[in-house]
Amino acid sequence: MNQSKKIFRMVFLAMMVAIGVVISPILRVEGMCPTAHLINIVCAVLMGPWYALLCATLIGIIRMSTMGIPPLALTGAVFGAFLSGVLYRASKGKLICAVIGEVVGTGIIGAIVSYPVMTLLVHREGLSWLFYVPSFLCGTLIGGSVAFIFLRQLARAGMLPRFQRMLSDRSFEEGSSPLSNAIAIAALGVIGYLIIKILTGMVFQTAGPLWNWAAWGMIAIFVVMALVYYLLYAQRKGAEAGE
């Protein structure tokens, strides 16, 4: 690797760490930080598992030392960041595998590890092994959906493999497909659902039947949009084949 590429990689890593620290308060409650998972997946896809692990570790340390965040800043990030990069490369460049790695690594492994850490180090009482699983999964689904849509658009524009060649030792070509685009549209509904649930249940404490229907309605709207998009594309391809 030439010197300029090494410098560019270090600058990009520093930029990702800085962005991760700055945007971490967005939609954050204890046990859930969606933007951290966004940064994890983007870094894992562009730079690989080891740099993603380093990025997550640095962000966690800075957040703990400057913002008073508990050790959840580390346990809720490092496992998902590394596993996201591992599964992405093992699948030879499937973005959905990067998201799955983050969900499993953080939402399950990180959440379970957080229990003994918070109990023994922070002396938090009233916890159980699965206490953090719901909030961690919620955060990973929000951040993972945003990362998937963002990286999908980069891939669609042909920019993703170019960035990978600039930042890592390998690149993957993943073209945009109607099915993947439909999944990305449906993912917006999941994001909307989780945001409504967070705002009404955890922030404003205004949860009720109306808001519950609104949250499910958000999913239904975007799922219908995704289905319509996919069917229209299939119909157009069928018409083109019949000409």
Image (cartoon, grey):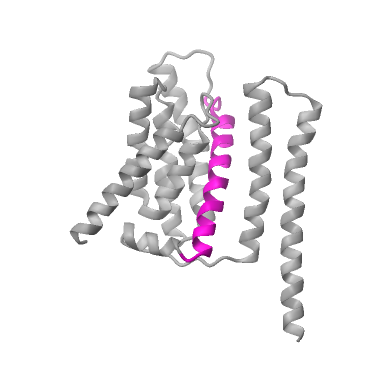
Residue 142, quarter of the rendered image: top right
* Count of number-bearing discs: 0
Residue 120, quarter of the rendered image: top left
User: Furthest residue to the bottom?
Assistant: 243
Residue 214 x/y as whole percent:
77, 35
User: Furthest residue to the left?
Assistant: 3
Q: Report the side of 232 relative to 64 (left or right).
A: right
Could you say which is closer to the camera, residue 4 or residue 142?
A: 4
Q: Is residue 53 visible?
A: no
Q: Is residue 123 visible?
A: yes
Could you say which is closer to the camera, residue 135 or residue 190?
A: 190
Residue 207 x/y as whole percent:
73, 23
Q: Report the side of 145 relative to 55 (left or right).
A: right
Identity of the residue drawn at 64% across and 55% down: 183
Q: Report the side of 222 relative to 50 (left or right).
A: right
Q: Main secondary structure of the magenta part?
A: helix
Residue 232, quarter of the rendered image: bottom right
Q: Which residues are magenta?
A: 129-158
**Magenta run includes residue 132:** yes
Residue 235, placed above or below residue 215: below
Identity of the residue drawn at 67% across and 58% down: 182
Identity of the residue drawn at 42% across and 29% down: 73
**Magenta run includes residue 201:** no
Residue 164 x/y as whole percent:
37, 60
Residue 196, placed above or below residue 168: above
Q: Quadrant of the C terminus?
A: bottom right
Q: Quadrant of the N terminus?
A: bottom left
Residue 114 x/y as whole percent:
45, 27
Identity of the residue drawn at 45% across and 63% down: 159
